[in-house]
Amino acid sequence: MALAILYVVGVILGVVAVLEILGQPINLLAKILVIAFVLFTSWIGLAIYYLALRGNLTRWFR
């Protein structure tokens, strides 16, 4: 049961991260790269996105 809850939380956080990335003013290729990174690396990608990339995407992909 706990793994199912953890899975659902991960899916919700992944969807929220993708929607935030799509709203960023960066080019399409950068959006695709960041979304692929977040989704393919699961929890590690979500942690890196929320801790390091979230507020810095426009600075990284000018």
Image (tube, grey):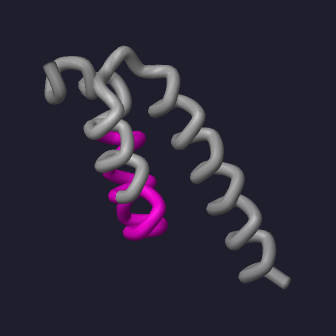
Residue in the image at 53% along x and 30% along y: 20
Q: Is residue 33 above or below residue 42?
A: above
Number of dots carrying numbers: 0
The secondary structure that dominates the magenta segment is helix
Out of 2 and 50, give the one closest to the viewer: 50
Out of 17 and 6, give the one closest to the viewer: 17
- Of the 4 image quadrants, the one containing the N terminus is bottom right
Expressed as whole percent of the image width and height from the top left, the position of residue 41 reads 38, 69
Residue 27: quadrant of the picture: top left
Residue in the image at 34% along x and 58% along y: 37
Q: Is residue 26 left or right of residue 4?
A: left
- Residue 3 belongs to the span the image colors magenta: no
Expressed as whole percent of the image width and height from the top left, the position of residue 62 reads 14, 19
Expressed as whole percent of the image width and height from the top left, the position of residue 31 reads 36, 37
Q: Is residue 46 above or below residue 43?
A: above
Per the rendered image, the range of residues in magenta is 37-52
- Residue 50 belongs to the span the image colors magenta: yes
Q: Is residue 51 above or below residue 44?
A: above
Residue in the image at 39% along x and 57% along y: 36
Q: Is residue 37 left or right of residue 3?
A: left
Residue in the image at 67% along x and 60% along y: 11
Residue 25: quadrant of the picture: top left
